Image (cartoon, rainbow, N blue to C red):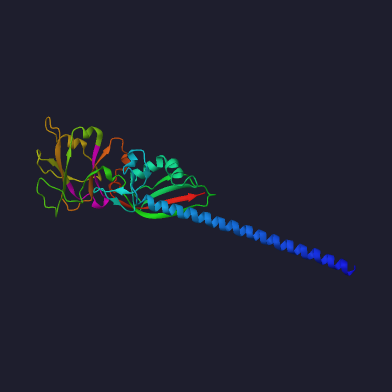
Amino acid sequence: MDNRGNFTLEIVVVGIIILLILGITALASEVSHEKISKNVEDNDIEKTISEIADTLINDPGTPIVWEDYKPKRVGLAIINEEENIVMNSVSYFKFLELGRDYDNLVTKKLFNNKFHSNMELKAYDTSISSVKIGSTETEDNNVFSVTRVVKCDFFKKYVICDFLNDGKCNHNHNQKDHSCNYFKIFPKNLKKMDYYLLIDDSENLQCEYSIDTTHFKSYNGKKVTNTEIYLNNDLKNLFEGNDTSSIVFIHFNKKDAKAVLVAVPKEFDKNKLNYKYFTTQTCDFTIRAWS
């Protein structure tokens, strides 16, 4: 082969090498681009759900009781008795209502149909069941999540009296060794609601309670033998003749009794008549999302 043939062969080899280098470079560039795009997408999901989580737990939404109406803006934060926003909180009933129209209120309005997602509320107290709303995850999903520590009120809206708070007593019991409180009741209330005294397990059923009114002013203590005490029959007997209402006093013979008086709807799930469900609890609020 003459010099011209060798030169031609060298050009072909160099060309092949250049093509290989260009191919490898292009492939590496494509892989790198895909990796960067994936990182941007992942960061976008994480940033979005983080911002949404912080907004939801610090905004009650509009109207502030939107769970009873059509919401203009959803939020989960609790509004307390003084009508102030409780920061880093979740209203249990707003959370449940969000789950009833999740696709519209969350997937569409919060995530603009970009992501699938779900939310979970998990109390630190294991006697309270966790609640999850939203889409179901699959094993193929690359799931991103954020968690915030929040306060949740669960069924606290049904509480009439909390015996950890001092109240008035028609026997003038010293609140240093008693827990007393009172409330007003109408006969029609007993037809719509079930009244219960709920006592925390930590009380060990070692205290007594009594119920009376300004008319029936007596102190016949009853031993607490159950953490769940049905009161409708006792309350019904406290009405005289044509009484249209009654002021009822309840007394515990110990200070700061961990007990609450609740009035729940007749159809209420009786399996959840647990003292802890009617007090504010610390929970993990988690949002999970995937594309």
**Does residue 283 lie above or below 236 as drawn?**
below
Q: Residue at x 59, y 56 (%)?
A: 34
Rendered location of residue 9, percent (x, y): 83, 65
- Of all residues, the one furthest to the top in this rendering is 242
Q: Nearer the viewer, residue 224 or 118?
A: 118
The answer to if 203 sits in the magenta stretch is: yes
Quarter occupied by the N terminus: bottom right
Rendered location of residue 224, percent (x, y): 20, 46
Q: Residue at x 77, y 62 (%)?
A: 16
Q: Residue at x 38, y 55 (%)?
A: 148
The reply, left or right, for residue 42 in relation to residue 271 is: right
The reply, left or right, for residue 96 in relation to residue 244 is: right
- Of all residues, the one furthest to the bottom in this rendering is 3
Q: Nearer the viewer, residue 115 or 61?
A: 61
Can residue 79 be seen by looking at this rendering?
Answer: yes
Which residues lie in the magenta part? 194-208
